[in-house]
Each structure stands twice: as C-alpha cells, then as structure tokens.
Amino acid sequence: MPSVASDFVAPFAGVRQVTGTLPVLVILLRPDSPSDSPYLPPGTPQIQNLTQAQIDALSRDRLRKQIFGPRKSVSTYFNEISYGAFNIEEAMVTPWLVARDDPATAVDESSHAFIHTSDIYKKGAWIIRQVEAMTTFRFSRYDRNNDGRVTEDELGVIWIYPGVYGGIGRETDPALVKVPSLSKGVQLNMLARAGDQSSWALMAHELAHQIFRLGDLYVDKAGYPGVGALSLMCDQGDGTHLDPWGKMKLGWLKPTVINEDGWYALSDVETWPQALILHDPKRGARDYFIVENRWPGQSHEDFLTMRGLAIWRVSERDTSGNWARKTIDLVWAGGPPPSQQLTPGQCPSRDDALFDGDSVATGYAPTPYSSPGRLVWGDGTPSGIAIWHISRASNNARLYVDVPPMQGPSMVGPAVAMTGSTRALDAHEPPYFFQPGRRSDDIVGMGIASDNHVYAWYRDGMVSSGTAADLGRYRAPYPYSIPGGRTPKDILAVDIASDDHVYAWYRDGTVSAGTTRDLGAYRPPASFTLAPGRVALDIVGIGIAQDDRVYAWYRDGMVSSGTSRDLDAYRAVYPFSLPLGRVPDNIIDVGIDTNDRVHSWLKANGTGAPIIVTAYATPGGLAPGKRTTLTIKAADSQGRPLENVAVVVGASAGAFATATRLITGEDGLAEFTWLAPPSVPSSYDGRVLIEIRATRHDLSDGRGLVDVPILSGSP
Ligand SMILES: [Zn+2]
C-alpha cells in the first residue's frame, strides 16, 4: 500500500507540531562583579563615558532587537522558517538583573563563580526564581491552560549572561521550579541560555532545543560528521534554515511522498513549504530520504553560497539519548567533510553538500551505487532509490525520481519485455530471447492467444510462438500471409482476441481479421479510426484485453481504448508511463494476456552501454509563439554526466532558435531554445512532441521525449 504524508509527519522523540504565537521571556542576569558588565559592540558612541545604567539600557535594547526586532532577528527567522506558522512575541525582556547573595545559603549567589561555574542544573532553577523576586513579571499570566504550571508550550524562557561564548540548554534541578504566582511552578524541558555576545542565530538554536525539543546535529566525539551549514541544529552562527525533517515534524513543511517514478518539481524551501519523501514501502516509514531545494535568495540564509538539492537520510528507530544524530544524516554530494573539519562541537564548513546539475562534481545522479554520495540506508543496505536527473540549481528545480523497484540501467539498452497495466508499462522483466539470427528490429507485431502463447510476426514473413521471454519456445518460425498485396513492413500492430481471431492493423489505416498464418482469413482489411489528432503512424502498439476491448498506445505517450475499427470508442486518450530512458517509439508491440496483464516489448537501442537521456522544458507549457528552454542531460547508467554526446532534437511543430544538434559539455548538459508554433496545433491534443536522440560512437543511443502543451487564451 502506498505511504501517505501522515506516516512521516507523525511526532518523533517528542518533536511534534508547534504552531501559533509563543510569548518568550528573556532574563538578563549577571553577577555582581565589575568584570561582568554587559557587552556593547565596538563603535557604540562615547562608550567610555557611559554610566552603568546607560550601558545596561543600551545592552537591553540591543538584545531585545536581536530577539524580537526587525529582520534579521530570532523572531523574523522563526516566522520565515515556519512559513508564518510559528511566531514569538515578547513576554518581557527584564532589565539587567544583578545577582544578590542569599544569606541563607552557603554559597555567594552574586559571585562570578556562582553565575559562571556552579551546578548548572540547580542554578537554572535559581535563575527562574529570581524573575518574580526581582521584577514585576508573573509567570501565572502565561499559564494558558490554568493547571498551575507554566511549560515551554506556554512560554519560552532564555537566560542571557555576560559572556563571549555560545549557549547551552540544560534541564533545571528541580524540574518543577516553585514560584510565588503559580500553585505548582515553572516546568521547562530545559532552560535556554546564551552569552550576550552570541548571535541571534545561536539564541534561535538554544530556543529550538527548548521550544521545539530538537537535538544537536554538529560533530560529536562518536564520529557523527554533522550536517554542515544546512541546519540551525548544526550551524548556530549564521542563521541558516532548519533541516526539512525538523520543519516537517513541527508541522510547517508539507512533504510530498513519492510513490511513482517520474518528474517532480521542487521550489526553494526558503520560500515554499515543500520537500519530497523517498522511501521503500517494503521497509516501512521509519527509513526515508527527504529531498529539499536550497536556494538562499533573499532569505535569512542569504549568506550561503551553496545552491541545489539537499538529500537527507532519516532513520527513525531510536529515541534514546543522542537521538537526533542517530536519526538525521546528510548525504554529502561532494563527499563527507575532511577530517580536519571533524572537531567535536564544530559544524563542518564543506560547501559542496548540495546536488547541482551544473557542477561536474555534484551533478551526478545519486543512486545506491553512486559516489561519493550514495542512497543507502543507515545500515548500509542499498535503498533501491535513485534520482536520475539533477537539474541545474534553480529556485524551481526539476528532478527525475526512481523509487523501488529501481530501474536497472540494463533497462535502457537491450531489448526487454515488461509487464504492467495499460497505464504503467514499466515493471521490468528480463531481456527476452529470439530465434537465432533474429533481433528486436525484425519484429513487426506481437500478440497473446487464449492459451497465453505469445506470437511474434517478423519482417521476413515468418511467425513464431513461445513465451514473453522466449519467443520461439513452442513453435519455430513458419510463414504467414497478408491480405491485399501488403507486406510485413505495412503492419503497425497485431493482437489476438478472446476467440483467437488475429487482428492486424496496417499503416494505410486498415485492419483485418484472420489466423496467425493468414491475417486476412476472416475479414479483409477495412478502415479504422483512432483518437483525434493522431494518424495511423502514431500507433506504437495495440493489445486486446479479455473483454475484447482494444487498447492503442501512441507515440505521444497516450493510450486509448475502443474497438478494432474505432480505437477510442470506449475511452479517450490518457497517459501511460515507460521506464526512464525509454520512449513510446521503442515499443515493438503490446499484448494482453488472459489475466489482463499487459506485456510490452521494447526494442534495443544498440549493443553497447546505453546513454541515459533525461530532458525537460522550462516553462513546461506556453502560449503560441513563446520560447522555452529545453534542457537535456546525457548520463551513463550510473547517472554520471557524459560529455561529447551529440544530441539531436526534432519537434512536431514550432521551430528551434538554436541548432538542432548540440554537443554536451562536461556537465552532460545540452540546452536548446525552441519557439512554439503561432497557434495551438491540432495534433496530440494541442501538445508539441520534442523527440531527442543522443549518440556517441562508443555507446548505444539514448532516446528522450518531451511534450510541451501549447496553451490557448491569454497567458
Ligand atoms: Zn545545541
């Protein structure tokens, strides 16, 4: 059963939907020591003449701006990364509080040592207690559900102390901190903390631990390599976006679960709450990849120089301890960070982590066998998932996703048989066997009889019978006759009805009925009609189902159903799919067996290793006379870009503004400009077919097909 988004957005390790507006309390508290004066940035006017009260006030303003102020602040950042779903507002920024000694205790709470080095858990509870003791702030106001307890889903709390270095979040001891205004007390999963010289991004990171319950994703002692500048939970310094796993679990990003091979588009995740989930239903929903499109643009992460697709590996199997690092991993496009970047506590800065079709190093197709990045599960098992087309980095990227079962590269080159439905022909079967001396090109039609024997008619006037995989298994070739002086090359397709009558369709638009040996024995050729906008030569295969409905597949990727003489009498055209690197024109013929399984046979494109062609047009649909860019990528069966491939294009209408033959560069790309015809074509339902052939002397041909809808009316 295909998986759905709800299988993946379910809470994990306490990380669950967080939306709405959360008040945040900022506690400014310092020791009573001159060395702990709040920080003011260099360039503050007359800094040496300021009184302590003026310094405190300037510092408080600065920190308030950093957290609640205009962009870039913690507040504008949370708004952006949540697509507006989560916001913070100021509950209070306390004045700078100066710690006071409690004479009832043995320690001096006002000392530098107490504030900076004493028991971090006990101190956290003490700091929360100081708020009601030293200010007018009352926690009770934030007890939204009136249970006598304030928790982090009601109030965020961050303590800021004078200090250069980062921050830290820790539980408090006791966990429930008694305060006068509440019957029970304040119970945060942790108190967020940061030095007053920390960036807003670090404060956002600390609050993310507290409010979102997210875990750290930087390098640790156990050898976790971090996720680089692609998640706030690794890079705390600059304000990079959160990883898509966090955004999804928090209920902000709405993933698309991929259950079918094909082309998908991804807009930049900085602006649009989009990502793709790739998984193997056989393995369940705990292992998956999330693919997002990073395009920093004018977002908070505008400092990033990386662009392209980020692929994240997720394994939701262990919620204990250091669960985040056990769960979330980056598939580094350019290879893992070098050892000198793997210092525990640091976030590696390697900046070729994204897949970019425009780059030789990171433009390869990630598959279970690619290198350096590969799509294997956490335990090293090949995932059966590939992304066969990685587009040039863009705010709207295109990718071709292959989910299990993975299409072997072997599907592209040799002649293969396939089993599927009328809509999806692409379940892979092994290559099939011919009689000695025959090749896939020699076959003019194939059909399946009521005993499920497969008949193949050949160009030389012979017919054999066997199985889908072994065409000559039952009966060696014997001669057949064709009515009315037609020759085998006039045959478009053949199939066999439930009464074992053999129907043959011809290029001149006629159909006959007969036997395997005499194609016209029962009925001489009579004309047939096909789906509008198509001619007889557009037919690539015809099959007859158990109920004697006749299905016709066309060169433009569509299929219709009807009778032998009216091919769309029952159902107008609908699309069908083929494996990557295959085009409808590769179909020799289609046969439908007694279980209504659809068998199709594809001819070989040559004998050497194949060129895999992927192609798309941007924009994909356009008004008459407009221009579109056709991007074509030639790759080997491992998805590596191939250079020096000659790519030839031809369109069923319109004109190319570039040459129709281009040679791929080292990125495997060739880019054509094509002008739509001046009006909507009457053929192919108003679409224009652009057919692609890619050749290189040492490889077998690659084929591709793109259809571009021409849109009528105003754009
Ligand atoms: Zn942290």
Image (tube, grey):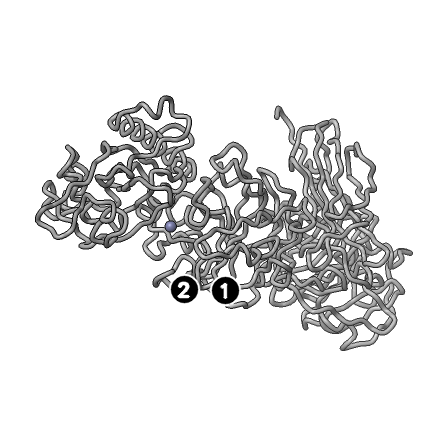
Check mark 1 vs ligand 1: CB closer than 8 Å? yes or no: no
Percent x, y of residue 599? 68, 63
* Disc 2 packing (10 Å; few <14; some 14–19; many ≥20): few
Q: Earlier in the sequence, mark 1 or mark 2?
A: 2
* Disc 1 packing (10 Å; few <14; some 14–19; many ≥20): some
Which residue is under mark 1? 378
The part of the image, by quadrant, that contains residue 630 is top right
Q: Amino acid at mark 2?
A: Arg
The part of the image, by quadrant, that contains residue 20 is top left
605 up-or-down from 517: above or below: above
Depth check: give the residue in front, 417 or 666.
666
- What's the mark number on residue 317? 2
Depth check: give the residue in front, 527 or 164.
164
Percent x, y of residue 404? 57, 62
- The reply to whether callout 1 and callout 2 are in contact (CB within 8 Å) is yes
Q: Is residue 415 left or right of residue 20?
A: right
At mark 1, the secondary structure is loop
Q: CA distance from mark 1 to mark 2?
A: 10 Å
Q: Is residue 557 left or right of residue 294?
A: right
Depth check: give the residue in front, 201 or 447.
201
What residue do we see at 27% from left, 48% from top? 116
Kindly tell me whether residue 74 is visible in this rendering. yes
Check mark 2 vs ligand 1: CB closer than 8 Å? yes or no: no
Q: Is residue 170 left or right of residue 473?
A: left
Q: Quadrant of the C terminus?
A: top right
What residue do we see at 49% from left, 34% from top? 299
At mark 2, the secondary structure is loop
> Furthest residue to the bottom?
474
Q: Amino acid at mark 1?
A: Gly
Depth check: give the residue in front, 308 or 480.
308
Percent x, y of residue 238? 46, 40
The part of the image, by quadrant, that contains residue 421 is bottom right
